[in-house]
Amino acid sequence: MSVRDSDILFIYEARLTNPNGDPDEENMPRMDRKTWTNLVSDVRLKRYFRDYLVDKYGWKSVWVTKVEGRHVDATKRVEHITKSRNPDEVKSQVLENCIDARLFGATIPLKGAGGRGESISITGPVQFTWGFSLHKVDLVDSSAITSIFKGREVEAEAGTIGRDYRVYYSMIAFYGRISSKRSFETKLSSDDIKLLDKYLWESIKLNTTTRSKIGQWPLLYLRVEYNDLYSIGDLRRFISRSYSENVRDLDDVKLDFTMLFNKLSEVSDKINKIYIRIDEMFEELYGVKEGLEEIDNLSGRIEVIG
């Protein structure tokens, strides 16, 4: 089955953690300082997904990853996949072996004659914008931490003061787009899209386990698949929201999906299917799955991702 155009909405929460540190700001959570909106790059989201793929299928299945636990440059990564220097063969082998290259694209270096560098650039059919919090976010008041080390030659212990920046709570929303037109170049299949549907969710649950990342949990994954070349656009525009002055938990944020339901009903003739996965508590608060199922002209086209 060929890949169809889709719009994606993905929402997850972050509690007392650092969703995406900014290396230019002492690894503080990325923030829009004018609105105090928490920002998360698409690179960070894809990293979670790629790490999960490595856990499931091994490093050979992922283009952008470590090799046997070691960092390698892209040229070395090519050598682990194919010994060919033919550009068409190299591209074909990378796309055949690497799930993330078929989804997100890749830049593949080639060794040219006389050592000259060349590359193959592939634009992925699946792209995400940067994510942002659906509310104002507060940083944890104290960021100082003390680490204690014991030297080999002395018995005295020395303390080192460091910084550990975190947010109290952040409900982060991403918008993604799948282009059927671009899927032909990367040989993207409907099975690859099913992996994205399932494993993007799992990656937030199971791969946010480092000290600075633990505390994140998926809330809603929604993919609107169209019959033809079409897009509603950024689905986050159709969510009304309000929130408490100091957001500290899920129920401090109030979301209203009525505009989204109305828009989906309006363009129902262009929709092939809607795929949804939702956290039980999130559904109790907002009834997203129930609301979709109540749209008469979408009857029978709502599929829950298992």
Image (cartoon, rainbow, N blue to C red):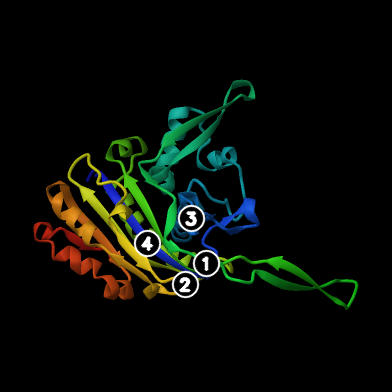
> Residue 139 at x, y = what percent?
56, 66
28 displayed left or right of 47: right
Residue 259 figure quarter: bottom left
State how far apart marks 3 and 1 are (Cα). Answer: 15 Å
Query: Mark 2 sits on what residue?
Result: 246
- Of residues 108 and 226, which is closer to you in this image? 226
Q: Residue at the spot x=32%, y=76% of the render? A: 281
Q: Are marks 2 and 4 in contact (CB under 8 Å)?
A: no
State how far apart marks 4 and 1 are (Cα). Answer: 19 Å
**Which amino acid, by three-letter code, is at mark 3?**
Val
Q: Residue at the spot x=57%, y=24% of the render? A: 112
For label 1, the SS is loop
For label 2, the SS is loop
**Which amino acid, by three-letter code, is at mark 2?**
Asn
For label 4, the SS is strand
Tell me which numbered mark, 2 or 3, is placed earlier along the sequence: 3
Q: Are marks 2 and 1 in contact (CB under 8 Å)?
A: yes
- Of residues 171 and 45, which is closer to you in this image? 171
Tell me which numbered mark, 2 or 1, is placed earlier along the sequence: 1
Q: Nearer the viewer, mark 3 or mark 1?
A: 1
Rendered view: 158 above or below 98: below
**Which amino acid, by three-letter code, is at mark 4?**
Ile
Q: Residue at the spot x=64%, y=72% of the render? A: 142
Q: Are marks 3 and 4 in contact (CB under 8 Å)?
A: no
State how far apart marks 3 and 4 are (Cα). Answer: 12 Å
Q: Nearer the viewer, mark 2 or mark 3?
A: 2
Query: Mark 1 sits on what residue?
Result: 138
Mark 1 crowd level (few <14, some 14–19, many ≥20, 10 Å Cα): some
State how far apart marks 2 and 3 are (Cα). Answer: 20 Å
**Which amino acid, by three-letter code, is at mark 1?**
Asp
**Residue 11 disc label:** 4
Residue ranking furthest to the left: 296
